[in-house]
Image: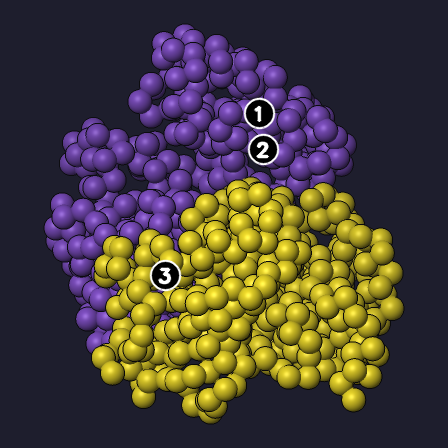
Chain colours: A purple, B yellow
Amino acid sequence: MKPGDHYGIHRSIEPPNTLPQPAWRIDPSLPIYDNELLLDVTTLNIDAASFQQIKREVGGTKEAVATRILQIVHERGKMHNPVTGSGGMLIGKIRQWGERFPHSELQIGQEVATLVSLSLTPLSIHQIHDICMETGQVEVEGEAILFASGIFAPIPQELPRRVALAVLDVCGAPGQIAKLVQPEQRVVILGAGGKSGVLSLFQARKQLGNTGQLLALEYSAEACDWLRQLHIADEVIQVDATQPVEVLKQVEAATAGELADLVINCVSMPHTEMAAILSTRQGGITYFFSMATSFTAAALGAEGVGKDIQMVIGNGYTAGHVQAAFEAIWEHPQIAAWFYQRYAGISIEAEKERME
Amino acid sequence: MKPGDHYGIHRSIEPPNTLPQPAWRIDPSLPIYDNELLLDVTTLNIDAASFQQIKREVGGTKEAVATRILQIVHERGKMHNPVTGSGGMLIGKIRQWGERFPHSELQIGQEVATLVSLSLTPLSIHQIHDICMETGQVEVEGEAILFASGIFAPIPQELPRRVALAVLDVCGAPGQIAKLVQPEQRVVILGAGGKSGVLSLFQARKQLGNTGQLLALEYSAEACDWLRQLHIADEVIQVDATQPVEVLKQVEAATAGELADLVINCVSMPHTEMAAILSTRQGGITYFFSMATSFTAAALGAEGVGKDIQMVIGNGYTAGHVQAAFEAIWEHPQIAAWFYQRYAGISIEAEKERME
């Protein structure tokens, strides 16, 4: 096998000698290089923005969407939507790996999900079997290649695949929190009712134990009711995160004016930077997990109110993040039931009966 | 005096009960509240993007620009450009403060610069004396109000005002570095030849002493020559920060493959996130000071290459940042001379003779 570059630069064709993500076209051909992993792909999970754009562009029939997907992958060597710039992730079974691929405990035939974007993953598709027009999951026969720098996770066989995918999609947040939250801290989760929010809430409580203070802030009244039933947060507060003054008042009231040592922003709406910044005490940390975060709004906003805080860009990857994300599913039946209902459309009891 | 809100919410008129920065209109009228500072304004330093936009809009004569500035301030109660959304800073002399204004050692008549944006600073202008059409500095007679949360710095009387403004404009970067850099670390400054870059470089060397390794990366050949003459960096490398693979190769070569513990990105161009991320070792820290940073490019970029690093949004404010920024000017004659030449258009020798 030929020696490959750690980041997959050896596969970039147009232009050569660049990273595979910004490259227009990459080479998905076999054989693999000495530090690569080869997967037999079974499912593409196309990013929502990309899938909606393709449906609009080609008119919404399954056949037309399939043709467009095949065309993109043929042209670019990867499922990298040229309009949205986004990708998605995939599920496949391990077929082969090079001797320099930096992972041990691999098994041929093991089902894994890639945790790097499809926009940089070399891909060949031989056939599309079916497309779920609601979720953007595409059943295919094909091959994909993971670079030495690529990350992936085994799919837990006990879970419906859609539940596993929903968890893996946001696993960065609970993974970071597992390292970040210390006992005795005051922690605020903004947007606690979404999937990254609830996984973050669970993980923060694990770290705090019975110490500190954990506040769950959420816009939807319905989600607030549900969060209260979980008995994880010390207080659940219904508030609009785009209203920083209102959020500040609520957090001040709940913390006796001390504010939070750590604020985790999981709100997927724009314009929530100031709510997070104002809720953080001087010297505290604000973590932004939402892709709707504006860098300049955060940087200039903190300066504008004289806040000497550390503002961190939520990294989708940290060592051990997959395990941390699934802990909520294994350990908290109500959270598991919510994921089953919302992402697989089934009750957890029905699924258990089916499995037995 | 009436009690004021810490963040100045009491001055927001349209809409009320919001932060003064997002408010369309704020109230700059006197008297001041009990936690405010009143300044007699002498100079507005209008943000470059805002000033260029106004010149284009009204046609470029001094009179037309003055009229537009007066109109904006009259309409909004602040010099908050409605097109660009940006502001700038101002210089004024302290006239009065409320008993709850949280600063001591104030002197009436002392000349200070505000370090919060004009886009949130209550301002009245009685007269415009002159406008420098190149730099956007506007000589005025007027009043401005600083909130309890607002930050400001005395103008060192030993420096030409333009040099002081240039330093104050970027003082967040060296201030953060003074707290961040530890002896023995490997530190990379990306964009070391600009004003925030060179102040960061100087401060990083102070922290490192003779330990660790300090690399200055810079695009311009001329700036690289000058940086080498400063004898601050262990190595000055000419490289284009929009080319991540090339930057990675250079940093790998210079660090014997170890990469940097800390990368400070001061490049004001877009698309330099990956160069900073790839140059950072696993477990290291990447600091983004450029306003051209894309949040999503950083967040998805690190995940895409499996980098478990902490990525920090450069906060323009940290306690003690003003002192840290001026240290380079007081302590390094060549850096001081560069600031004099570039921002005041004079040689430091000529200025010294004039002062004597």
Q: Position of B245 compared to B114: left or right? A: right
Secondary-structure class at tag 1: loop
Q: CA distance from mark 3 to mark 1?
A: 53 Å
Marks 3 and 1 on same chain: no
The three-letter code of the residue at mark 3 reads: Gly
Residue at image x 66%, y 41%?
A7
Measured from the top left, where is residue A233 in percent x and y? 21, 61
The three-letter code of the residue at mark 1 reads: Lys
Measured from the top left, where is residue A101 in percent x and y? 64, 41
Residue A354 sits in quarter: top left
Measured from the top left, where is residue A32 in percent x and y? 67, 28
Mark 3: give few (<14), some (14-19) or many (20+) Cα within 10 Å.
Answer: many
Secondary-structure class at tag 2: helix
The residue to which callout 2 is attached is A120
Q: Nearer the viewer, residue A165 or B243?
A: B243
Q: CA distance from mark 3 to mark 2?
A: 49 Å
Q: Position of A309 compared to A161: left or right? A: right
The three-letter code of the residue at mark 2 reads: Leu
